């Protein structure tokens, strides 16, 4: 699993501190699309917003197991993004981060893209992201993500699959690819939503004979009452089962570190209002 030796140069909030921690940028837009520069959620991250039943802010969010346990759930600063217009449901986003942390021996920066299709009850996506020189241990790490949702009547189903690959800078062979899966179902009855979400992650350890591969899965049950498009109540129960060397946790692994192999579970309630 993800650990301190794999810690990226640019974490989930991007490199350095800057003047703001949330999405902050300047740009221009027209019929040809939009261009912005600053600190912003990457195309890889936003592509799963319509799929993850819990966004990226609750304990059951995708980053507890998926997105390489949050390593690919980034808001990079010093980047440029291009957002295409919508062409009959198709759209894409591109991003490139400047190499402002370049040294005599490393040249760290991120780049990525997504392609989405949104039409009626169907949403489909593919996303790619690459981190160059993310840590002393790796020359490169990349993620591929594929998924979608489909709604029929009061039911919405979603699924997403990821594969994370690393190129070692210090030892050979490269680690095994990490494979991650998310699947959920949402049943809406009036203002009430009943939600089940499953996540699974395996491999990503040393690619040598006898090496123990990290493995974990989680199950989440939730109830949500939607007052308006901007305000809702939510109650969640999440249980994460860590097998072998698994260190999977809740939506923010930096806040809830887990010892390898230990299971975790929690219940929470909350009220959210979007200003």
Image: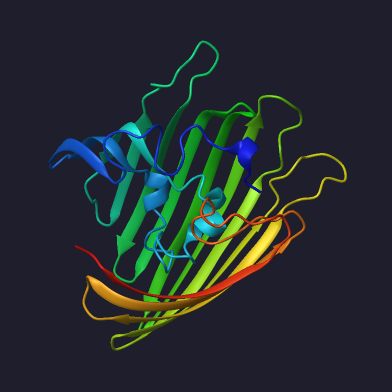
Q: Quadrant of residue 43?
A: top left
Q: Nearer the viewer, residue 40 or 165?
A: 40
Question: Relative to 188, does residue 79 appear above or below in the rendering?
Answer: above
Residue 107 percent coordinates (x, y):
49, 20
Residue name at image x 63 percent, y 43 percent:
3
Question: Relative to 191, does residue 60 appear above or below in the rendering?
Answer: above
The residue most toward the top is: 104
Q: Nearer the viewer, residue 38 or 142?
A: 38
Residue 106 relative to residue 28: left or right: right
Q: Nearer the viewer, residue 22 or 138?
A: 22
Numbered circles on residues, count: 0
Residue 115 percent coordinates (x, y):
37, 48
Q: Quadrant of residue 226?
A: bottom left
Residue 200 percent coordinates (x, y):
62, 62
Residue name at image x 38 percent, y 59 percent:
49
Question: Relative to 151, does residue 160 appear above or below in the rendering?
Answer: above
Residue name at image x 29 percent, y 76 percent:
232
Residue name at image x 71 percent, y 58 percent:
215
Give the position of the C terminus as an image quadrant. Answer: bottom left
Q: Quadrant of residue 40?
A: top left
Colour pattern of the rendering: rainbow
Residue 20 relative to residue 63: left or right: left
Residue 213 percent coordinates (x, y):
76, 51
The residue most toward the left is: 30
The residue most toward the right is: 210
Residue 220 relative to residue 118: left or right: right
């Amino acid at each position: 699993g993800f650990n301190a030796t794999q810690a990226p140069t640019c974490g989930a909030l991007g490199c350095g501190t800057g003047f703001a921690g949330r999405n902050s940028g300047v740009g221009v837009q027209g019929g040809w699309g939009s261009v912005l520069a600053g600190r912003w959620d990457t195309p890889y991250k936003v592509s799963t917003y319509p799929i993850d039943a819990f966004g990226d802010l609750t304990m059951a969010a995708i980053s507890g197991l998926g997105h390489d346990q949050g390593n690919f759930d980034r808001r990079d600063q010093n980047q440029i993004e291009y957002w295409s217009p919508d062409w009959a449901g198709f759209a894409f986003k591109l991003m490139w981060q400047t190499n402002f942390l370049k040294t005599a021996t490393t040249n760290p920066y991120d780049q990525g893209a997504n392609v989405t299709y949104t039409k009626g009850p169907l949403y489909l996506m593919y996303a790619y992201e690459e981190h160059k020189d993310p840590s002393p241990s790796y020359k490169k790490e990349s993620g591929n993500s594929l998924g979608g949702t489909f709604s029929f009547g009061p039911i919405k189903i979603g699924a997403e699959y990821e594969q994370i690959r690393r190129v070692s800078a210090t030892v050979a062979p490269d680690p095994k690819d990490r494979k991650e899966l998310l699947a959920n179902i949402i049943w809406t009855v009036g203002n009430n939503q009943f939600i089940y979400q499953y996540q699974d992650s395996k491999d990503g350890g040393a690619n040598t004979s006898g090496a123990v591969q990290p493995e974990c899965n989680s199950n989440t049950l939730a109830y949500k009452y939607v007052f308006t498009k901007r305000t809702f109540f939510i109650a969640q129960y999440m249980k994460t089962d860590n097998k072998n060397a698994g260190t999977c946790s809740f939506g923010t692994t930096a806040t809830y570190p887990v010892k390898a192999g230990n299971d975790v579970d929690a219940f929470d309630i909350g009220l959210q209002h979007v200003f």
